[in-house]
Image: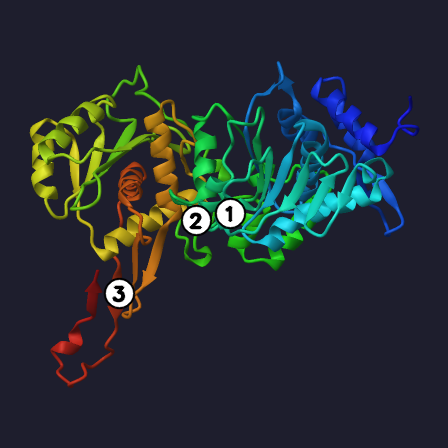
Amino acid sequence: MSTTQMTALEVLRTLSATARAGRLNILNFLERNFMLEGSNFLVKKPIRFEPWQRDHILKPVIEKFDGKRRWDTFLIGIAKKNGKSTLAACIATYALLLDDPNPEVYSAAGDKDQARIIFNFTKKAFERSPGLRRLVKIFRDTIERVDGNGIYRVLASDSSGSHGLNPSCVIWDELWNQPSYGLWEALTHSPARDNPFHFIVTYAGIQARSGNLLWDLYSRGLRGDDPNMYTLWLTGKDANPASRITRDYLDRQRRRLPECGFRRMHLNEWRTDEATRVFRIPQECWQGAFEDCIRGIVYPGNAYCGGVDLAKVHDYTAVAIIRKDVKPCRLVYFCKLPHDDYTRQVEIMVAMLKRYWNPKTLVDASGAGTVVIELMRGHGLNVEEFKFTSESKARVVTNLTMGFEQRKLLLPSVGRTSDENRAVQDLEAELFNFQPTVLRSGSVRYEAGTGYHDDMVMALCLAYAGAVHVPREPFVEVIELGSGAPDGDPFESRFRWHRIN
């Protein structure tokens, strides 16, 4: 019997059973039936997926092995205007009609209006498509299957009414705007479902810190420590895979938006409090890697430089090691040391630095620094004191800022171990949340944002300062007093007055 002779109920049940049995080409079904708006409201056109959409987003969600989906959480991070909402609407259509026999599909976002965006894309696609329209009943915030066995609904951001739901699929839009873990926890996967999943489409957020839902998921995805999570996060030049995004469009957006906003929305790069960033790190600077000591160097210690920021009361001792015999320089090792007495920390640093042939290492000499430096020298380490003042700190921070802007330093984007991955995450968070504060005197103080540390940032500043050190000529300001001194003293008139900083 052809589908034109079958009732809507029969068509739906046949489609659903065929899809779950793996006998339906789901992508082709969507391309035949999911209708986009054309040049006017009377013109409809079926969707056509681009290869990156098919291969890297839709297939990972749809494909099952022995009836099981490989992943249960999908984090898709791409720039604005690359068709995220349309793709999410396709996933919602699949989840409602072709996946679970009794689906509960929900749209969630930071507020109900945002969640309704993807719902409305799906709703309009059903309304435009003769093949889909008769399979559902459409209401303002709900789409129901005609067999009564499934719903697609919009959720409010308030999690209080979401506990007790049993979702088969949750579509999350712009997760960076989710205020807390509350709704995520309320909609967690249920063991009563065979293949429940979360599908997240978003661009980068503004809270690069542990405890922020999107940042935590993004960090977990980069580390790859959750085997049930699929992550596609495209940034920089790769952030706009859609063929319709042109260079001219991006250039126009860059002119219209603040740089920080452009980079977040159109390059999918994480921002913090937008205008307060010290380090604007190009994506290509995150292409380094952890390295062990290179072998065969004739002059040990000549290829590396270290930096150590010593713990005070509530922070950590941090160590950074840069390889400087290559261009650009590379951060090849960095870590925070466990809270312990300085004697034990020195022992750890001795073993660590001697693995890199005891390079010259700049060490924070403030506080107890001079004592620790003498301990390090007593173990034969090649250390140099660095005293932090507002001026010297500004100098090394500025040096590092210029190093990033000029692409002279590469940072690892991923580690080889869980500890190294955690170090990458910590460094990234510290760099993103390092801020300038303008004092009443007009000078600038550089420090970690509220709730953050800057230990790894300062260790990196010290290592980079040692790696690219160029002797500085003293600045001399000459004040010419003319032929006579102010008080008319002929003896004073023989001199030019200098101020040397």
Quadrant, the N terminus: top right
SS class, disc 3: strand
Residue type at mark 1 is Trp
Can residue 82 be seen here? The reply is: no
The crowd level at tag 1 (other Cα within 10 Å; few <14, some 14-19, many 20+) is many
What mark, if any, has residue 176 been given in the picture? 1
Q: Position of residue 237 (x, y in %)?
A: 59, 39
Q: Position of residue 276 (x, y in %)?
A: 41, 57
Q: Which residue is depicted at the point 83% across and 32% down?
A: 32
What mark, if any, has residue 207 been given in the picture? 2
Q: Which residue is depicted at the point 67% across and 30% down?
A: 52
Distance (Cα) linking label 2 and label 3 = 44 Å
Q: Determine which quarter of the picture holds residue 333.
A: top left
Question: Disc 1 or 3, which lies upstream in sequence?
Answer: 1
**Residue closest to the eye, 200 or 297:** 200
**Residue closest to the eye, 48 or 380:** 48
Q: Position of residue 165 (x, y in %)?
A: 55, 39
Residue bearing mark 3: 477
Q: Determine which quarter of the picture holds residue 102.
A: top right
Residue type at mark 3 is Glu
The reply to whether the C-beta atoms of the residues labelled 2 and 1 are less than 8 Å apart is yes
User: Which mark is nearer the camera, 2 or 3?
Assistant: 2
